[in-house]
Amino acid sequence: MQDGRRALGERGERIALHALREAGLRIIERNWRCRAGELDIVAEERAPDYSRGALDSRWLVVVEVRTRRGHGYGSALQAFTRKKQAKLRELAALYVREREWEGPWRIDAVAVQMDRSGRLIDVEHIRHAVTG
């Protein structure tokens, strides 16, 4: 059972990596770990930072990937719980401190939904999925 979940998660991450690259993000790290947990993907993207008045900034993007096959345990988006979001805020802050990142950063989500047989149904990239 655990191997099946791991394989599904790895497949979802590969799909998410492709979607992120297609969207113009550059992948920096995968599966970054610390004592508090793990970040699935860390990337960079060139985009405006209106809070600083910059039209072209380098953003650090922490990405959580949620993959579901079927809807028996809810959709991939439903797996993105408040508890998970709180953990992501904590992990992202640790990553930013460790890397001494001084630019803008955000937390995105990629939801990968498959049917029961494992056929891809939908991939949704949500920018700024976790705030405050």
Image: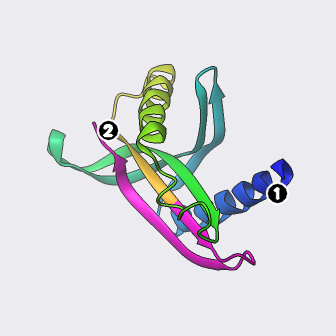
The answer to whether 56 is drawn above or below residue 36 in the figure is below
Numbered-mark total: 2
- Nearest the eye: 124 or 61: 124
Where is mark 2, residue-wise?
Answer: 104
- Nearest the eye: 45 or 78: 78
Which x, y percent locates residue 49? 23, 47
Q: Nearer the viewer, mark 2 or mark 1?
A: 1
The answer to whether 130 is drawn above or below residue 110 in the figure is above
Which x, y percent locates residue 18? 61, 66
Which x, y percent locates residue 106? 37, 43
Residue found 73% across the figure and 74% down from its top? 118
Q: Report whether 120 appears left or right of 111.
A: right
Q: As shown in the figure, which amino acid type bears the numbered disc 1?
A: Gly
Q: Under tag 2, what secondary structure?
A: loop
- Nearest the eye: 43 or 41: 41
Residue found 45% across the figure and 46% down from its top? 81
**Is 59 included in the stretch rendered in magenta?**
no
- Nearest the eye: 107 or 52: 107
Asked which quadrant contains residue 9, the reply is: bottom right
Where is mark 1, residue-wise?
Answer: 4
The answer to whether 20 is drawn above or below residue 83 in the figure is below
Asked which quadrant contains residue 36, the reply is: top right
Residue found 63% across the figure and 35% down from its top? 32
